[in-house]
Image (cartoon, rainbow, N blue to C red):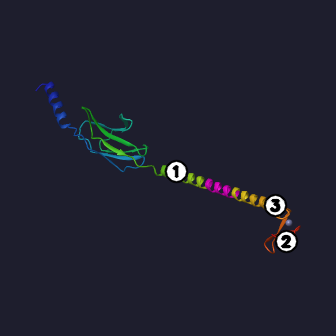
Amino acid sequence: MSAVGIVVIGLILISTINVQAAGKLQAKEVTYNSVVLLWDESTAITFTQYEVYQSESKIGGWSLVKIIDSKSTTTYNVSYIKSETEYIFKIRYVDALGSEESNTVTVTTLKDPLKGSIEQAVWYGYAICIGGIAIIVIVVVVIVWLSVKKRKAKVQTPSQVCPTCGGAIRFVQEHQRWYCDKCQKYL
Ligand SMILES: [Zn+2]
């Protein structure tokens, strides 16, 4: 057999054995800012690397987030991603003869617990402020109303005059009645 023939047969053998069955990708342990990716180990004998790709579904477009050159490392913790956001991940299996992609997994990160408590604190703050303002407004209205009422009462008292002589009259506390000194009688 010629050298060329051996090389050709060798290449055919390698490409046959080097079957890169697309590994299955899974997502686990989703938090508000991270996700753990797990995928099947490459079966390629000429394995080069795994490439972890990420896409924010709203924005679109793939970005390479990690290159792993160890065949047995089939997990990656994607961290510091946004909370309450939909992400899509895929793994590209690269070997000397080419590359193949895994399935995609879609993950929606959880709500940031700290962000939630800050929002709640802000709302409590607002509620306290509005409550405080309401109490102040009520107190001011009551004070104004009371002073107006008092002033009216004060104004009414000296206008009391004797219907007989038109002179000033005075209120006798003891008898709870009005008395005219000029006419010397109770009204
Ligand atoms: Zn009188």
Q: What residue is at 16 percent from the left and 34 percent from the top?
A: 13
Three-letter amino acid code at disc 3?
Pro
Mark 2 lies within 8 Å of ligand 1 (Cβ measured): yes
Q: Is residue 66 visible?
A: no
Question: For the residues marked 2 and 1, what is the alpha-carbon distance in whole angstroms?
Answer: 75 Å
Crowd around label 2: few <14 · some 14–19 · many ≥20 (10 Å): few
Could you tell me what secondary structure mostly forms the magenta stretch? helix
Name the amino acid type tagged 2: Lys
Q: From the Cβ of disc 3, is ligand 1 less than 8 Å away?
A: no
Q: Residue 43 location in percent, x, y?
A: 23, 41
| Residue at figure coordinates x 18%, y 37% from the top left | 17
Which of the marked residues, 2 or 3, is nearer the chain's N terminus?
3
Magenta region, residue range:
132-143
Quadrant of the rendered image containing residue 179: bottom right
15 or 165, which lies in front? Answer: 165
> Which quarter shows the C terminus?
bottom right
Q: Which one is in front in this view, the residue at disc 1 or the one at disc 3?
A: 3
Determine if the magenta segment contains residue 1: no
Between 153 and 68, the one lying in front of the other is: 153
Identify the residue position indicated by label 2 in the image.
Answer: 185
Above-or-below relation of 94 to 39 = above
Q: Position of residue 47 (x, y in %)?
A: 27, 37
Q: Secondary structure at mark 3?
A: helix
Label 1 element class: helix
Where does the image place residue 135, in percent across and percent down from the top left? Answer: 63, 57
> Disc 2 vs disc 3: which is toward the camera?
2
Q: Which residue is mark 3?
A: 158
Q: Look at mark 1 in the image and give the residue it sits on.
A: 118
The answer to whether any part of residue 130 appears in the image is yes
Sequence-wise first label, 1 or 3: 1
Question: In the figure, is residue 27 to the left or right of 5?
Answer: right
* Structural distance between the alpha carbons of marks 1 and 3: 61 Å
